[in-house]
Amino acid sequence: MSGEMSGQEPRSPAISLVSALVDEGLGNSAYLVDLGDGRALAVDPPRDVRGLRAQADRARLRIAFVADTHLHADFLSGARQLAADTGAQVLASAAGRRAFDHTRLADEDEADLGGLTMRALATPGHTDEHLAFLLLDGPRPLGVFTGGSLIVGAAARTDLLGPGRTEELARAQYASLQRLATLPDHVAVWPTHGAGSFCSAPPGADRTSTIGAEKASNPLLAAPDADTFAARLIDSLGSYAAYFDRLTELNRRGPQILTGPPALAPLPVDQTRALLADGAVVVDVRPVADFAAGHLPGALSNPLRPQFGTWLGWLTDPATPIVIVRDPDQDPADITWQALTIGHENLVGELAGGVTAWRAAGHPLHSLGLTDAAHIGERPIVDVRQDAEYAAGHVPGAVHVELGDLPAHAADLDRRPYVVMCGHGERAATAASLLARAGHRDLAILAGGPDDWAKATERALNQGQLEGPEQGLELGR
């Protein structure tokens, strides 16, 4: 998690008390509240608590309280870790039945934070036990931590408990949003889920809002009735990672407390080969160009970036031992903390010396093509972006399979010399490595995305290299 502030202009006096720490990869925000007496409240912290701890240290605050709005499905909570590290009191829903020490809150219960008060508001929908936390200064409401209920421009998804309950929970979400809408317009809205989250958050730069702003602009909050709301929300739902289905229970039990920073053990080439023979998987976190130039046979490409953890959890089994291959300038802590935050505990180590050591030991490396939009030619394209991205504009004739679905469908695709495409190239590299593992050959990764293809096509037309009206990006399915 980055320790950066949200960067938004204050909309209420409460904003000066609250720091938003945004995880760009998971699309979530955690919050640190200065309680005014040297103590702080943390809300919805991830398992990687380094950003919150650093922010608290800079402000000379001790984290005395930590609150979770719900049993998270997309990341492991850091509440239990903060309690162990700082002695913080954990505040959470009684209905969540957490199996570790915490103060159990029900609807309208209040927690005295020493000058400020936090009131629990039952807001089911995203989950059954969901609470929003209203921060009060005396009788005056300052802001509300809305978790996965009201989010900027939308509401969080309601299908995480199975398709049989999606509509029921959508109707509960409608009632929860209507309840929040009765708060005064000036009240700040501090959601957990935001742009980049797979919990149905729309794209956009704003991470926080106000009740008044959401009443004026949020299309779901403007729905005239529960039927319309449910239809709009359900229609907006896209896919989500399989690891969402197991993290809720892990959060209920409480993630294992870490007694020190995680590390990657160095693994000699021979030990790496033995692990691979026993079923381990190599995850290569190097940049796309490095992976394409040469990688261990069967390696899964997942370039290290803020989204690394999401795709690690989406595409690998948590029970499968993982061996990391990285470049020397890539920080192992960025790898291990992202893995731990999505519940992957089975990183057994890293290949000591990387691909250089592998090659020096006489073992082969495989390679993939890397191309730009101007040199695709007539090669068929596989587009692995999400459905909504594909519908917004894609290369005509492209085969579309979401990256998360590709492991189940890679073997079914015709054996053709595909160029694999996403928005920039990282997901395309992952997809190409999956296709290679499934036996596809003559693959190339597009360094770029559909917009680059459209620009290259326009240039070719202008230069007379294409005849006739070449079509632009196609919309819809």
Image (cartoon, rainbow, N blue to C red):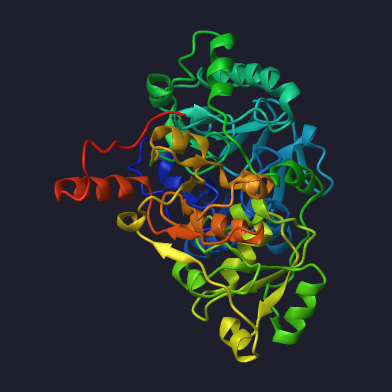
In x, y percent, where is residue 254?
78, 51
Q: Is residue 32 left or right of residue 375?
A: right
Q: Is residue 185 above or below residue 406?
A: above
In x, y percent, where is residue 215?
42, 20
Residue 348 in sight from this viewpoint: yes
Q: Is residue 428 left or right of residue 474?
A: right
Residue 3 in sight from this viewpoint: no
Name the foreground residue: 283 vs 349.
283
Name the foreground residue: 373 vs 261.
373
Name the foreground residue: 170 vs 473.
473
Name, please, the residue furthest toward the front. 467
Which residue is painted at 38% across and 42% down in the image? 205
Q: Quadrant of residue 104?
A: top right
Q: Is residue 55 above or below residue 213?
A: below
Q: Is residue 195 left or right of residue 451?
A: right
Name, please, the residue furthest toward the left. 463
In x, y percent, where is residue 357?
61, 88
Q: Is residue 331 above or below residue 100?
A: below
Number of on-image labels: 0
Name the foreground residue: 113 vs 21.
21
In x, y percent, where is residue 442?
52, 62
